[in-house]
Image (cartoon, coloured by chain):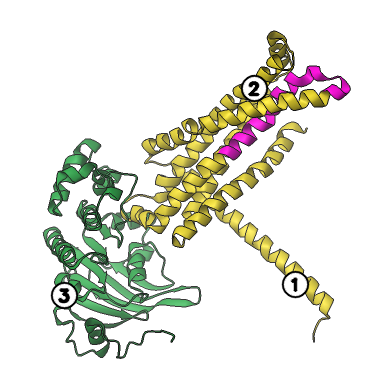
Chain colours: A green, B yellow
């Protein structure tokens, strides 16, 4: 499978524009197998578009995406689906199916892949929910009946239930109070470690980035401007990253505001 | 060199017409591709029987009251209108024939189609549109599920099958509405009215209406799914999707009604 030298995900020259707006302008990034990569960046810097490209939800205008050393653009539809079968994703706002109860949400992928019967799915859901600290009694509720933190945890349970090799987290702590944010981070670290998965998170929450990341990369105006260890965030010596990490108004990154 | 002003303006006009035409053609092409992909998913497993059933019950069962009321009142009005109109040339006897032919060939499928466009087209567009703007459609993709197969295909099939069944009921209730007015108000005897109803009715009258109904059911669910699928821009986008689903499917029903009538009744 993935040899020592081959990164799990390799992006080269990834570019994407929407009309005249250039969102990705040549993103190069290597994500090591079994490690947790945090992609930082301000709003509108292209973080979400990057992972949507890797997931195949958006087709890039140029550049290559390799997963396990294979260019995904050259895969057949079936092979591409097989790659996606091993990827999990936690969406920013959960994106839970509000017409389905929690247990069906959690086991959706297993049911879709026919790896489990509907009868067994309830037990499996209870098991996965326990891993994210939720009681089995949540199983029969609908997503609209859950608090924001619980929705996030159900979303996490859904992302890990099929035991993926790669998991994406889109702003996992946004919209949560700091304590719940830390709880979610802890669950993410535990789950990723238990699965031995490669994790890619996008965030602008520095505390969260240091907690869940091994590696970090900063994206600005559609380009990766820095990569390094997540532990060094805040004292990287890179003026842009440090400004971002400390949340300073003055620095190389100028917000485009009109007075 | 500058073209004289009137010519300029004339060219502007043609350009505007051309732009609109291209937009319409591009839209039609996109919808056609969307429909073709959805149909192709109906032929390949996995199939979502549970979702088909849910959509079918939503369309057939829950539209029943609205469609039934529409049909009964339409039948009643038809009887009344044709009676008073036909009295001018002593043709009151044709009331029963007029009611049954109008209902089965024309008004049953069209009015039921328009009612279902309001109910189902709007509901599907709003539901799928909300799923689009809350990332649920993207989530389906990451969960080994093709959203066209999961969301669109079962709904299209349900609409195409449910509409003819609704129209059978609308036909019966429409004739009943006419019979009610005919016997209670216009002085027909029950037996004579029913005899007149069935004497000149041909199977093709009913079947052609049911074919129309199937087409309308397909169009309504297709436009509902398409507009929802293309929705963007939060709550406002979903609102726009809902509106355009109802408007476009209503217009398509009326236009296709003409086309189908011309195809089926002119030889």
Q: Nearer the viewer, residue A150 or A190?
A: A150
Tell me what residue is drawn at x 23 percent, y 53 percent: A154
Residue B91 colored magenta?
Answer: yes
Q: Residue A225, percent across and down?
A: 29, 84
Name above or below for residue A77 compared with residue A6. above
> Circle 2: is it few (<14), some (14-19), or many (20+) Cα within 10 Å?
many
Q: CA distance from mark 1 to mark 3?
A: 59 Å
Q: Residue B177 got which mark?
A: 2
Instruction: Classify mark 2: helix, strand or loop.
Output: helix
Which residue, as the protein is rendered here, is positioned at the far right? B89
Q: Quadrant of the N terminus of chain A?
A: bottom left
Dot placed on the residue nearer the N-terminal end, 2 or 1: 1
Tell me, yes or no, if residue A73 can be seen here.
yes
Name the residue tied to disc 1. B12
Residues shaded magenta: B87-115
Left or right of residue B244: residue A135: left
Is residue A186 found left or right of B223 in the rendered image? left
Circle 3 packing at 10 Å, graded few (<14), some (14-19), many (20+), is some
Residue A249: horizontal and vertical position, in percent? 30, 87
Q: Nearer the viewer, residue B247 or B46?
A: B247
Q: Chain of mark 1?
A: B
Element class at badge 1: helix
Q: Position of residue B16 (x, y in %)?
A: 71, 67
Q: Nearer the viewer, mark 3 or mark 2?
A: 2
Marks 2/1: CA distance?
53 Å
Callout in the foreground (2, 1): 2
Residue A210: give its label. 3
Quadrant (top left/top right/bottom left/bottom right) for the C terminus of chain A: bottom left
Q: CA distance from mark 3 to mark 2?
A: 73 Å
Residue B62: x, y in percent?
47, 33
In this picture, is A211 found above or below A225? above
């Amino acid at each position: 499978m993935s040899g020592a030298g081959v990164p799990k995900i390799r992006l080269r020259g990834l570019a994407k524009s929407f009309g005249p707006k250039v969102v990705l302008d040549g993103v190069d990034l290597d994500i090591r197998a079994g490690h947790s990569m945090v992609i930082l960046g301000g709003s509108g810097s292209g973080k979400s578009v990057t992972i949507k490209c890797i997931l195949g939800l958006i087709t890039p205008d140029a550049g290559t995406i390799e997963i396990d050393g294979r260019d995904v653009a050259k895969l057949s539809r079936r092979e591409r689906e097989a790659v996606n079968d091993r990827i999990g994703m936690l969406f920013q706002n959960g994106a839970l199916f509000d017409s389905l109860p929690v247990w069906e949400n959690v086991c959706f992928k297993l049911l879709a892949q026919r790896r489990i019967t509907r009868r067994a799915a309830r037990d499996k859901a209870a098991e996965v929910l326990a891993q994210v600290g939720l009681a089995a009694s949540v199983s029969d509720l609908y997503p609209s009946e859950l608090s924001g933190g619980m929705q996030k945890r159900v979303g996490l349970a859904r992302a890990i239930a099929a035991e993926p090799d790669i998991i994406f987290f889109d702003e996992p702590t946004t919209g949560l109070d700091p304590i719940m944010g830390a709880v979610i981070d802890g669950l993410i670290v535990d789950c990723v470690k238990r699965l031995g998965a490669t994790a890619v998170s996008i965030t602008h929450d520095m505390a969260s980035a240091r907690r869940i990341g091994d590696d970090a990369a900063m994206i600005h105006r559609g380009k990766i401007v820095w990569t390094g260890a997540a532990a060094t965030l805040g004292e990287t010596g890179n003026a842009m990253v440090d400004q971002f990490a400390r949340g300073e108004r003055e620095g190389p990154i100028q917000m485009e505001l009109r007075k | 060199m500058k073209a004289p002003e009137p010519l300029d303006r004339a060219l502007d006009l043609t350009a505007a017409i051309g732009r609109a035409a291209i937009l319409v053609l591009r839209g039609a092409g996109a919808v056609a591709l969307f429909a073709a992909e959805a149909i192709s998913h109906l032929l390949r497993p996995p199939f979502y029987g549970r979702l088909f059933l849910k959509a079918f019950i939503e369309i057939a069962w829950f539209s029943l009251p609205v469609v039934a009321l529409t049909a009964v009142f339409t039948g009643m009005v038809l009887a009344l209108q044709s009676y008073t109109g036909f009295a001018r040339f002593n043709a009151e006897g044709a009331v029963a024939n007029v009611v049954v032919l109008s209902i089965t060939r024309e008004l049953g499928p069209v009015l039921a189609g328009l009612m279902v466009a309001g109910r189902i087209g709007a509901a599907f567009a709003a539901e799928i549109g909300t799923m689009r703007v809350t990332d649920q459609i993207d989530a389906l993709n990451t969960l080994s599920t093709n959203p066209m197969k999961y969301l669109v295909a079962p709904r299209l099939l349900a609409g195409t099958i449910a509409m003819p069944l609704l129209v059978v009921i609308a036909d019966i209730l429409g004739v009943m509405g006419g019979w009610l007015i005919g016997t209670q108000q216009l002085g027909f005897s029950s037996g004579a009215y029913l005899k007149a109803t069935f004497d000149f009715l041909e199977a093709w009258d009913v079947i052609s209406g049911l074919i129309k109904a199937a087409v309308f059911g397909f169009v309504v669910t297709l436009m509902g799914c398409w507009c929802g699928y293309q929705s963007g821009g939060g709550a406002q986008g979903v609102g726009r999707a809902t509106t355009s689903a109802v408007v476009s499917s209503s217009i398509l029903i009326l236009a296709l009604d003409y086309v189908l009538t011309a195809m089926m009744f002119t030889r």
